[in-house]
Amino acid sequence: MKPEEKIFRILLERHDIDPAAAVFVDDRVENVAVAERLGIRGVHFTGPAELSANLSRMGLL
């Protein structure tokens, strides 16, 4: 279960996801921190406008 690294590692491996190509969005900063430790870009969700701005800065919108 989140925020344990094991679940992130399982998902990355099972779906052959390059952590550097992934983005994890969550409203809990501790969950985002775990993802970031594994090389996943993390976004702390605080609202839709901020999420949109963050994803735009990443070139995803």
Image (spheres, rainbow, N blue to C red):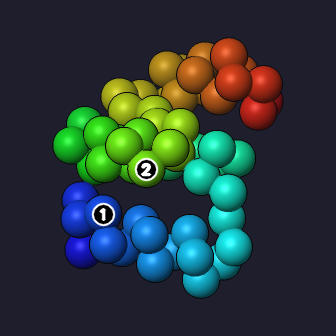
Rendered position, 5 above or below 32? below
Distance (Cα) linking label 1 and label 2: 8 Å
Report the amino acid beneath label 2.
Leu
Determine whether, in the image, residue 31 is placed left or right of residue 44.
left
Could you say which disc has been placed on residue 59 in the image? none
Crowd class of label 2 (few under 14; some 14 to 19; many from 20; radius 10 Å): some
Q: Which residue in the protein does label 2 denote? A: 38
Determine whether, in the image, residue 11 is placed left or right of residue 35.
right
Could you tell me which residue is drawn at 69 percent across and 73 percent down? Answer: 16
Crowd class of label 1 (few under 14; some 14 to 19; many from 20; radius 10 Å): some
- The one nearer the camera, 57 or 36, is 36
Tell me the SS state at disc 1: helix
In the rendered image, the quadrant that contains the N terminus is bottom left
Tell me the SS state at disc 2: loop
Determine whether, in the image, residue 22 is placed left or right of residue 11.
right
Visible in this render: residue 44?
yes
Residue 47, x across and y down, in percent: 41, 29
- Which sits earlier in the primary sequence, circle 1 or circle 2? 1
Could you tell me which residue is drawn at 70 percent across and 47 percent down? Answer: 21
Report the amino acid beneath label 1.
Glu
Contact, CB < 8 Å: mark 1 with mark 2? Answer: yes
Q: Which residue in the protein does label 1 denote? A: 5
